[in-house]
Image (cartoon, coloured by chain):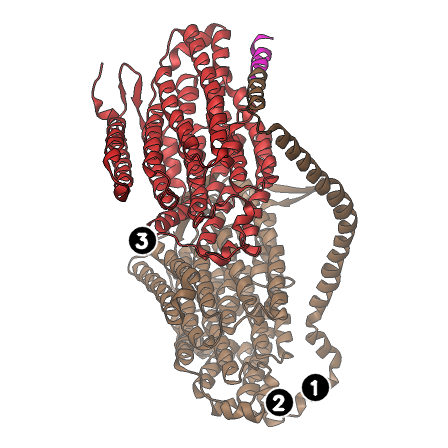
Amino acid sequence: MDFSLKAMLPEIFLATMTCVILVLDLYLSDRFRRVTYLLSQVTLVFAAVFAIALWDNHFVLMGGHFVSDKLAVVLKTSVFIVGFCIFTYVYDYLRERDIRISEYYILALFSMLGMSILISAGSLLTLYLGLELLSLPLYAMVAMIQRQNTASEAAMKYFVMGALASGMLLFGISLIYGSTGQIHLDALPVAINMAEQPDMLLLLGVVFVVIGIGFKFGAVPFHMWIPDVYQGSLSPIVLFVATAPKIAAFGMLSRFLWDMFGAAPETWQSFILIMAVLSLLLGNIAAIAQTNIKRLLGYSTIGHVGFIFLAIYAGNFAAGAFYVLAYALMTLAAFGILVVLSQRGIEIEDITDLAGLDKQHRWLAVMMLLVIFSLAGVPPSIGFYAKFVVLSALVDAHVAYLAVFGLVMSAIAAFYYLRVVKVMYFDEPTQTREITIPHGTNVLLSINTLATWVLGILPGGLMAICLLLY
Amino acid sequence: MLTWLSIIIILAPLAGAISVGLLGRVMGRPPAHWITITSVAISFAASVWILGIYIAQPFEVFEKTLYIWGQSAGIPIEVGVYIDSLTIAMMCVVTFVSLMVHIYTIGYMCDDPGYQRFFAYIAFFTFSMLMLVMSNNFMQLFFGWEAVGVTSYLLIGFWFKRPTAIYANLKAFIVNRVGDFGFLLGIAAVFLVFGSLNYGEVFGHAELLSNETLTLWSGTTVSMATAACILLFIGAMGKSAQVPLHVWLPDSMEGPTPISALIHAATMVTAGVFMVARMSPLFEQSTAALTFILVIGGTTALFMGLVGIVQNDIKRVIAYSTLSQLGYMMIAVGASAYAAGVFHLMTHAFFKALLFLGAGSVIIAMHHEQDMRKMGGLWRYMPITYITMLIGSLALSGIPPFAGFYSKDSIIEAVKLSTIPGAGYAYFAAVAGVLVTAIYTFRLFFMVFHTKPRMDDKTKSHLKESPWVVTVPLILLAIPSLVIGYILIGPMLFAEHAFLNPSLYVLPQNDVLAKLGEHFHGALAFTLHAPMTLVFWLAVGGIALMWALYIKWPGIPEKIKNHFSIIYKILVEKYGFDIFNDWFFGKGTRGVGNVAWKVGDIKIIDGAMVNGSAHLVGRIAKLSRYVQSGFLNQYVQIMIIGLLGLMSWWLYAWVG
C-alpha cells in the first residue's frame, strides 16, 4: 500500500485551510471580513498549484480508492480556477447586500473539496463520498439567503430530488457490487461479467448509476430541479451551481463510464443517447418561452448537456471534456456578468432587465455579446469549436443523423440567444442607472470573456490536453 | 528564422488593425495612423529581409505549417506559409504599395470622420492579402480570398451614406460571389482528385489531374484538369475582374482613392493572376483551360480599354485601364508565360498605384471633383503631381525605358510565339490594345494637365500642390515605375536562373519565355530594339494622336463623337453588360423571388412552417410549463417515470 500522501496534497490542503478559515472567521469582526475572502482565494491558488504539480505522475493510493491521473489534474485545476473567478465576481455583490460572505465562501470551499474527491475517485465508495460532500453544501447555499421565500423553496426541491438521486445511485452501486463483488473502478470485472453473457444485475445497476450522473448534469428527464433552482436562487449561487459542479460531474461520468465500463460501452450507450436527445429537444425548445434570464440560461444548460452526452455516446470522451470545459468557461462569464450587473438594489431577473445595456455600459454589453455568441456557437468562438468537435465525432462514429439533429437544435438555440442580444442593443433602457465595476473584477471578467474567443481561434492547446486524458 | 519572419509579416498588420479597430476612437487620430503605418512598415522590412536571405542563398521553397486549427473529414484546416520566389515577389509588392498608401491616406482622408476606421480596414486588408499570398494550402488561400473580398466590400462602401457607394459595394460582393462559387468548386475538384489541399502534395502529383475525367452528363466527359482549372479560373475572373465578371470594378471607384490604388489596382485584383501563376503545375495540364484564359484575357485587354476612351471620370478611366492591364496579365499566364504575367503584375502595381494616387492628388486639389471636363491646365499648379503622373502615363503606355514597356513587350512577344489555340486572337488583342492604352492614357493626361482650365474660379483660386504625405508616396512610387522594368527584366524573365523560375512550372513545349530568352541580350539591347517594332510605333502614334486631338485641334473629338455616335453609344453603355445584368439577373431574380415569396414564403414557410412551428413551440412550452408546475411531488414523479422509462429500455434491450 502506497501512502505517499503527496498525491492528495490538493485535497488535504483544501480541507485544512477550509477548517482554518471556518474557525478564524468566527473571531473576525465584520470590518475584517475581507480576510476571509483573501484567504479563500489564496487557498484556491495553492490548491491549483499543488494539483498542477501532479501532472506527470499517475498515483493510486489508499488501496485503490484514490487516484490521481491527468484527468484528475485537469478537472481539479479547472474547478479551482473557476472557483477563483467566482469568488472574485461575487465579492462585491455579497458585500453590498450584507450577505454573510464567509458562509458563501466556506460552503463553496467545502463543495469544491467534494468535487476534488469525486474527480479523484478510485472506487465507487469514494465516488459516492465525494458526491455527497459536493452536494450538501450546495443545498445549504441555495437555502442560505432567507429573505427570499423562493430560495427556501428551491433548496427544498433541490434537496429532496438530490436525495432521491443519491439513493438511486447508491442502489445502483450496490447492484454492481453484488454482481461483480468489486467496488473499485476497474474495468476488468465488468469485462469478465460481460464476456460470457449479459449480466442482468450489472446492467440494472448501470441504469441507476447513469440516472445519478444524469441528475448531477441536469439531463432530461432528471432536469426538473434546474429551472426552479436557477430562478429561485440569487445570481451568485447560480453562478456556482451552474459551473464547477458540472466539471466534477464530468469527472464522475468519466470515472464510471470510461474507467469502469469503457470496455463495454454497449451497457450504457443507449441510456446516454436517450438523455442526450431529450435534453437537446427540451432544453432548446423550452428556452424559447422563457422570460427570466436565469431560467433561460438554465434551459440552455440542459441543451448543452445534451451535446456533452452526444459526445459521450459517440465514445469521444475527449470531445466531451473539451465541451464541458468550454461550457464552464462560457457559463462562468455569462452568470458573472449577471452578478456584476446586479448592483445598487437591482437584481437582474428578466431578459428585459438587460434592455439598453449597450447605452449604460458599453464594455459589459460587448462582453455579454461575445459570451452569448459563444454560447450560441458562432464561429470562431470556443462554443463553436466545442460543437464542431462533437459533431465531427458523431460523423466519425457514423451517426450523421445525430449530427444533423444537433445542428438543427443549435439553430433553434441561436434564436433565443440572439433575442438577448437584441434586447441589449436595440431596446431602450427601462431605467437610467450607473454601473460601476471594481477594477479587478473587470479585468478578470474581461480575460474570461476574451478567453471564450481566443480559445476558439486557437483551440489546439486545450484540445491537445483533452486528447491526452483518454 | 524564416518562420519567425513570416509570422511577423502576417501578424504585424493584424495587430495594427485590431488595436486601431477596437481602440481607434479612444486613441485619436495620430496614434491610429502611427500604429498601422509602423505595423505595415515592419511587414515590409521583414519581407525585404526575406528577399535578402533568398538572394544570398536561394532556396527551392520554404514550407511550414504554423498552426492546425482543426480537422474535418481528414482535411487539416491549417495556417501555414509557403515561401518561394513568387511569394517573396508578391510580399514585397503588397507591403510596399500598402505602406505607400498608408502614408498617403494621412493626407487624403485628413478631414474624414471615419479616419481611424479607414486605417483599421486597410491594415486588415494587408493582413488578408498576405494570408492569401503566403498560404501553403487551398483552405487558407480561400480564407484570404474571402477576407480581401470582405475588406474590399467594406471599403467600397466606406462612405456608407452615399447610395451609389452602397450599390457599388453590393455589386462587387455579388459579382465576386459568382466567381467564388466557381473557385470553391475548383478547390473541391482538387480535393476530389488529390485527397489533399496542401500545395506541396497537390503540385507534387499534378499529373494525376490529367488522368482523371469528369462525366458531365452521360456520354459527355471532360478532362478533370480542364474542369478544375476552368473552375479555379472562374474564381480568378471574379477577383481579377475579367469579362464578363468585370462589371464591379468600375463601380468600385465609389470608394476612397487610396483604396482604388491599393485594392482595386495594385494588389487584390491581381490575386487572380497570382493564383493562376501559383497553380501553374495544374494549369499546365490543360491546354483547353489555357485557351479559355487567353480568350477571356484578350477580350478584357482590348474591349475594356476601348471603354476607357469615352469615360470622363478621372478614376473611371484608370479603372478601365486596370481592367485592360489585368487582361494583359491573363494573356501572359494563358500563354504559359507566367513569369511575364507576374512581372507585369509587379510593374503595374507600381505605376497604377502611382496613377491612382496622382489622380487622388488631383482630386484633392479640385475639391473632390472627378470630372475631367472640369479640369485642365493643372501642370502649372501641381508640378510634382504632374511629373509623377507623366512618368506613370508613359509607363502605362509602354514607352521605353519606363517599367511598363518591358513587361508589356515581353507579354506581347511571348504570346506571339505561343502555339496554344487562341494565342493568335490574344496577340491581335494585345497589339491593338497598345494603341488603345496610349489613347486613353494621354487623353486623360492632356485633359487634366494641359488644355485650357475649365474649372470655376473659386476652385481655381484654391489650386495648389498637395501636402508632402501625398507627394512623397508619389515620388517613391515614381522611382520604381521609372527604373524597375529596366533593372528587373533580365533577372526576372530571361537570366539563366531567373528569379521566378523555381516557383513556376512550364511544360517544355509551352515554354515561350525560354524561346524568347535565346534572343535576349540584356535590357539595353531590348530597349534599343524597341523602335524596330510595330508596338512601339503604335504607342507613340497613340500619344501623338491625342496630342493632335486635344492640344493642337481641340474641336475634333466632338466631331468624331457625333460622326460615330453608334460606336460611341455602345462604348458609353459599356457594351450593355450592366443593362443586361440589370434586366436579366436583376429583374429575373426579382421575378423568381416574387414567385418564391408569394408561393413559397407566404403560403408554405410563413403559413405552414413558421406559424406552424411557432404553434408547436408554443405548445411544447406550454406543456413544459404545465409539467414544470412547481410542485415537488410532480417533479419526483417525473424522475420516477424517467427511471421506469430507462428500466423498460433495459428490459427491452437485454431481456426481451
| Colour seen for chain A | red
Where is mark 1, residue-wise?
Answer: B560
Disc 1 is attached to a residue of which chain? Answer: B
Query: Residue at the spot x=56%, y=64% of the render?
Result: B331
**In this rendering, is residue A270 above or below B229?**
above
Q: Earlier in the sequence, mark 2 or mark 1?
A: 2
Instruction: Find numbered disc 2 in the image and state the secondary structure of the residue it sits on.
Output: helix
**In this rendering, is residue B10 above or below B639?**
below
Q: Is residue A215 visible?
A: yes
| Colour seen for chain B | brown
Instruction: Give the residue type at disc 3.
Output: Trp
Say whether marks 2 and 1 touch (CB < 8 Å).
Answer: yes
Q: Nearer the viewer, residue B472 or A447?
A: A447
Disc 3 is attached to a residue of which chain? Answer: B
Q: Nearer the viewer, mark 2 or mark 3?
A: 3
Residue B549, numbered circle? 2
Place of residue A115 in the rendered image (x, y in percent of width and height, measured from the top left): 36, 27
Q: Which residues are magenta?
A: B646-656
Place of residue B245 in the rendered image (x, y in percent of width and height, measured from the top left): 63, 62
Instruction: Give the residue type at disc 1.
Output: Ile
Disc 2 is attached to a residue of which chain? Answer: B
Q: Is residue B288 in the magenta section?
A: no
Instruction: Give the overall secondary structure of the magenta segment.
Output: helix
Q: Is residue B652 in the magenta section?
A: yes
Residue B4, numbered circle? 3
Place of residue B346 in the rendered image (x, y in percent of width and height, measured from the top left): 45, 67
Q: Residues within 10 Å of mark 3 (few under 14, many from 20)?
A: few
Q: Compute the Cα span from label 3 to label 1.
A: 60 Å
Q: Earlier in the sequence, mark 3 or mark 1?
A: 3
Q: Is residue B420 visible?
A: no
